[in-house]
């Protein structure tokens, strides 16, 4: 299996054209092996974790430098300052990335209040050109992937859940439906910005296990990148050692020992 992943080459970014840099001269490379890759973005609040996530997800363009993604299917997408395409296999590369290669599960729900559970999950497939008849069975199968074991029988035996609207769901249920929506098109990379930030500890563990199962189900073909403030808790839940630490306009690859040292220093 070929190695795939992403590269940031001397990337600098700011939110305003003449504002201060948030991230500065970032050079970073992630080569994704055949094992499951789950990469948390950690560090102090307000230092650019979400900004880095948006850059990697093509939701924000760099002010300087280049970003490149190489995928298992051999496609390469690269872009620089102002959204300028450098190398791409599609004329509309950002739309293609977002609809086919990337999935998004953010703290603010992407669910439409006017669509039912099953319609919300199926909607990304319609954006790809599929019809409702094709999309709805795929949406139901995807929902099964993110449900807890005790929920599957209840929901599969009743169509009422599928026909509910987001306002009729609990917080944990909405989060899992949003996850199903984010992965229904089987993306290579799932981006999540504080996906469990508003959930209690029990529900947070449930959602993180859903994410872990999704990555491990197709090892080497999926990658999870998420912003978190839970630090060691998320490393323990996901059983991983590696992270990207964002601080003082820089980001570096670290391991668990580095994070423990930072936490100890920040508490003194």
Image (cartoon, rainbow, N blue to C red):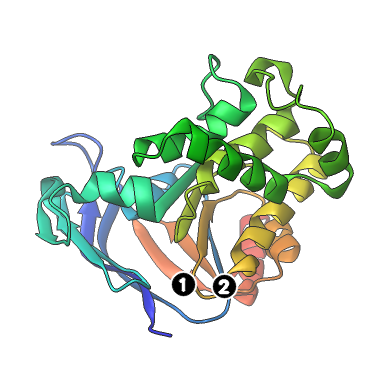
| Residue at the (55%, 19%) spot, across then down | 115
Q: Is residue 214 left or right of residue 159?
A: left
Instruction: Give the camera-side residue of 127 and 112.
Output: 127
Q: Is residue 105 left or right of residue 118?
A: left
Q: Position of residue 213 (x, y in %)?
A: 69, 61
Instruction: Give the camera-side residue of 88 and 5.
Output: 88
Question: Mark on residue 253?
Answer: 1
Question: Mark on residue 242?
Answer: 2
Q: Secondary structure at mark 2?
A: loop
Q: Secondary structure at mark 1?
A: strand
Residue extending farthest to the bottom is: 1
Q: Position of residue 178 (x, y in %)?
A: 59, 36
Q: Can residue 229 be seen here?
A: yes
Residue extending farthest to the front is: 133
Q: Earlier in the sequence, mark 1 or mark 2?
A: 2
Quadrant holding the C terminus: bottom right
Q: Position of residue 100 (x, y in %)?
A: 36, 51
Q: Marks 2 and 1: in contact by CB < 8 Å?
A: yes
Q: Is residue 215 above or below residue 126?
A: below
Q: CA distance from mark 1 to mark 2?
A: 7 Å
| Residue at the (48%, 62%) spot, across then down | 245
Quadrant holding the N terminus: bottom left
Question: Mark on residue 64?
Answer: none
| Residue at the (67%, 39%) spot, across then down | 176
Q: Position of residue 41 (x, y in %)?
A: 50, 57
Q: Is residue 222 left or right of residue 201?
A: left
Local crowd at mark 2 within 10 Å, few (<14), some, or many (≥20)?
Answer: some
| Residue at the (20%, 34%) spot, across then down | 16
């Amino acid at each position: 299996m070929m190695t795939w992943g992403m590269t940031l080459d001397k990337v600098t970014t700011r939110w305003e054209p003449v504002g201060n840099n948030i991230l500065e001269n970032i050079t970073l490379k992630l080569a994704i092996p055949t094992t499951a890759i789950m990469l948390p973005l950690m560090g102090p609040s307000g230092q650019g974790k979400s900004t880095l996530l948006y850059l990697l997800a093509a939701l924000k363009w760099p002010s300087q430098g280049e970003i490149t993604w190489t995928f298992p299917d051999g496609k390469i997408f690269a872009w620089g300052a102002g959204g300028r395409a450098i190398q791409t296999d599609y004329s509309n590369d950002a739309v293609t990335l977002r609809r086919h290669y990337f999935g998004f599960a953010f703290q603010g729900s992407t669910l439409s209040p006017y669509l039912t559970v099953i319609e919300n999950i199926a909607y990304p497939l319609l954006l790809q050109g599929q019809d409702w008849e094709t999309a709805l069975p795929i949406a139901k199968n995807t929902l099964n992937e993110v449900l807890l074991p005790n929920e599957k029988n209840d929901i599969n035996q009743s169509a009422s859940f599928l026909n509910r609207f987001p306002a009729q769901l609990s917080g944990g249920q909405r989060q899992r439906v949003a996850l199903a929506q984010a992965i229904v098109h089987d993306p290579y990379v799932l981006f999540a910005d504080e996906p469990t930030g508003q959930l209690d500890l029990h529900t947070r563990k449930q959602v993180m296990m859903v994410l872990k199962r999704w990555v491990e189900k197709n090892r080497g073909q999926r990658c999870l990148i998420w912003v978190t403030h839970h630090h060691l808790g998320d490393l323990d839940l996901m059983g991983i050692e590696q992270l990207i630490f964002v601080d003082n306009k820089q980001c570096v690859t670290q391991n668990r020992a580095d994070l423990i040292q930072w936490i100890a220093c920040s508490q003194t």
